[in-house]
Amino acid sequence: MKIRVLGCSGGIGDGHHTTSFLIDDDILVDAGTGVTTLSREALARIDHVFLTHSHLDHILCLPLLLDSVAAGRDQAVVLHALPEVLGILKDHLFNWRIWPDFSRIPSVESPYLHYASLEIGESVHLGEREITAIPANHVVPAVGYLLRGNQGSLLYSGDTASHAALWDSVDQATDLEHLLVECSFATAQEAVARASRHYSSETLAADLALMRPEPAVWVSHLKPGNEAIIMAELEVLVPGRVRPLADGMVFEV
Ligand SMILES: [Zn+2]
Ligand SMILES: [Zn+2]
């Protein structure tokens, strides 16, 4: 299983893209602006989209992806997410006012988009690849994903604040090669981090100090302009433990 980082920033500007990962050539995990880096041909090959949550930076390319390539495909794109997340998208996005309801066009019998509810702890198997929703702690219903190939696993936290259940998932994944964990804010923005339920350097470092040393740790969702200060703070608090995730990186598990 090959995982390509299309976008991993907490915002845009200076060439940064928001969160999206391409797995092999047929699965997307989140659909932030990183999706815009793909060719139309690559977009058309995507059969499954897994969403961590409904926030705009993780979904905003999904409506445009469907509009650009769905008509040329012979099967619906399957959208996997918590039932609460699917409900939010149906009510507030695919509602004909913001964007058409692609689960009903061109026809109810043969739509461009198919909704697939996914519960926390549930695994979806696609060929030899296993994708499991893991718990997250955010201001809206949210998950992370454990992505398991035939060589090991990679865990992506999604947007989250400190959450014991996330670290239980890390402990239980004995084949974990890589942890991709968010850290949106520097310590000075701890109040914003707490209110918006994101990690800050201090809260992430406290949790990482308890983690076993083997898996590599990559930091994502850094807020634009704050990348250097967040990484510098983490380097002081947990020396040598973390590296910044970057657009274009490829992982194989
Ligand atoms: Zn979010
Ligand atoms: Zn986000």
Image (spheres, rainbow, N blue to C red):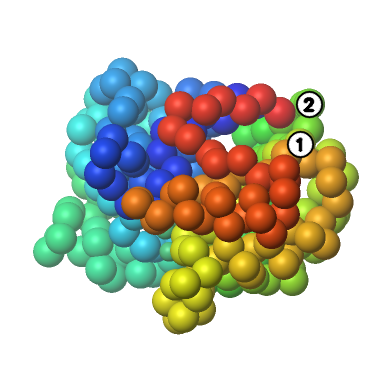
Amino acid type assigned to the residue bearing label 2 in the image: Gln
Amino acid type assigned to the residue bearing label 1 in the image: Glu
Q: Which residue is mark 1?
A: 177
Question: Which tag is nearer the camera, tag 1 or tag 2?
Answer: 1
Asked whether residue 42 appears in the rendered view, the answer is: yes
Residue at position x 82%, y 62% in the image: 210
Q: Judge from the rendering whether residue 97 lies leftward or rightward of residue 8; answer left or right.
A: left
Of the numbered discs 1 and 2, the one sitting upstream in the chain is 2
- On the image, the x and y values in percent for residue 95 come to 21, 64
Cα distance, mark 1 to mark 2? 9 Å
Out of 171 and 63, give the one closest to the viewer.
171
Q: Judge from the rendering whether residue 24 lies leftward or rightward of residue 78; answer left or right.
A: right
Q: Is residue 234 above or below residue 176?
A: below
Which structural element holds mark 1? strand
Out of 10 and 98, give the one closest to the viewer.
10
Residue at position x 66%, y 25% in the image: 252
Tag count:
2
Q: Judge from the rendering whether residue 194 lies leftward or rightward of residue 134; answer left or right.
A: left
Q: Which residue is mark 2?
A: 151
Residue 130 figure quarter:
top right
Image quadrant containing the C terminus: top right
Asked if the residue under mark 2 is in contact with the one under mark 1, i.e. CB atoms within 8 Å, the reply is yes
- On the image, the x and y values in percent for residue 178 come to 70, 39
